Amino acid sequence: MSRKQQMPRPASDLGTDDTGCPILHVDMDAFYAGVELRDRPDLRGTPVIIGAPGARGVVLSATYEARRFGVHSAMPMTRARRLCPQAVIIPPSRGKYAEVSRRVMEIFQTFTPEVEPIASDEAFLDVGGARRRLGPPTAIARMIREQVVREQGITCSVGVANSKFVAKLASRHCKPDGLFVVPADRVVDFLHPLPVAALWGVGERTERSLACLGIKTVGDLARVPVETLQRDLGQAAGAHLAALAWGRDERPVTPDVPDKSIGAEETFATDIADPVEIRRELLRLSERVAARLRRGGSVGRTVSVKLRRADFTTLTRSRSLREPTDVAKVLYDVARSLYTASGLENERLRLVGVRVENLGPAAGATRQIELGERETGWREAERAMDRAARRFGHDAVLPASLVRPPFDGVDP
């Protein structure tokens, strides 16, 4: 069972006064599983696990019925099946989840422009400016929950508080399908009974360090002088945890935070040593990353590959381009070159990845056409593929080497 699942629940009798609590944290309930159950209502109320069914797969999501057996996201599928052998396993449908996520974020935008997505299934909202039009934060939270169910057929939990940190803890407290308010004058009452692991920045190592000091709850931490925390944990970490222990979190909701990087990776069902297969996978990942760049209106300048050996040692290599790009062929050419130069072409790999960093808006990017180069080419072809994918599905148009069954001996 994960550390989050082990956390005791805080007091639930804090009242419902949302004065001074404009921050909402909206979190979909078992998002990927919820989307699948929307299309498979016969499975509601039963243990369901979303993830690749192979021995090397991991759990992407699980219904709350499966979680009662100890199943949680990122768990190896083999362990999940041992814990809950009666669970129904559903392979993920990533394109479907992305579309539902986009529509959910659009719902949030109808209530306030102050929306900060932090994952595909959760976001912070500042509804302070919507009070006059829509009512108090709790009423807005109820309307959001109702609209998500009505339009998307899935549920969400909402925390209402005076800061992002407390709102996120509140949404966790009321899962699944709940609404929880932490009044501004009851923040300390809410926080102090919690274990220190509830605080952002407290990982397992920090938790052990604090336990050595006799600190087990947030209240214990709050009573320790900040100087002592800074001496044992470092200046920044000590000050950060001391502030959170008293509910102080001044970060505003920041809409449209740009991605710092976009990447994709794949763990193979069995380790692969064939360079042709590795390059084919690098091409597929480059296509995925480039499509995400174009969908987000971004281009990137630095391309990196991630190569994990069978013994789990991991090698990363990167190269910066002369000009930023969103073209899969360019990404693949660099990724393939980095793989060749890595010295791992004849080694067994269990995972490969492609990532693009140093992102910027595509609208502001300039491109120098090479002498003799046509003004239209790969970029236009890939945008045409995007249009076909939106209409007919993401596998409607693919590079020939990615069509299955693969062409024997054809090196992409």
Image (cartoon, grey):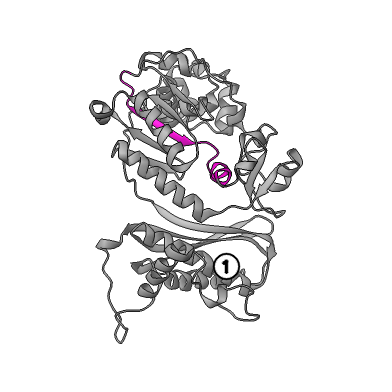
Quadrant that contains the N terminus: top right
Q: Nearer the viewer, residue 29 or 248?
A: 29
Q: Name the residue located 48 percent from the left edge and 12 percent from the top edge.
A: 13
Quadrant that contains the C terminus: bottom right
- The relative height of residue 108 versus residue 351 in the rendered view (above or below) is above
Residue 105 colored magenta?
A: no
Query: Could you say where residue 71 lies in the image, as x and y percent from the top left?
Result: 67, 38
Q: Is disc 1 surrounded by few (<14), some (14 to 19) or many (20+) residues within 10 Å?
A: many
Q: Nearer the viewer, residue 321 or 95?
A: 95
Image side of residue 102 versus residue 312, left or right: left
Residue range of the region highlighted in magenta in the rendering: 19-38
Could you say whether the residue bearing mark 1 is in a helix, strand or loop? helix
Dot 1 corresponds to which residue?
A: 281
Image side of residue 351 versus residue 372, left or right: right
Query: Could you say where residue 104 lies in the image, as x and y percent from the top left?
Result: 41, 43
Q: Name the residue located 64 percent from the left edge and 35 percent from the top edge.
A: 45
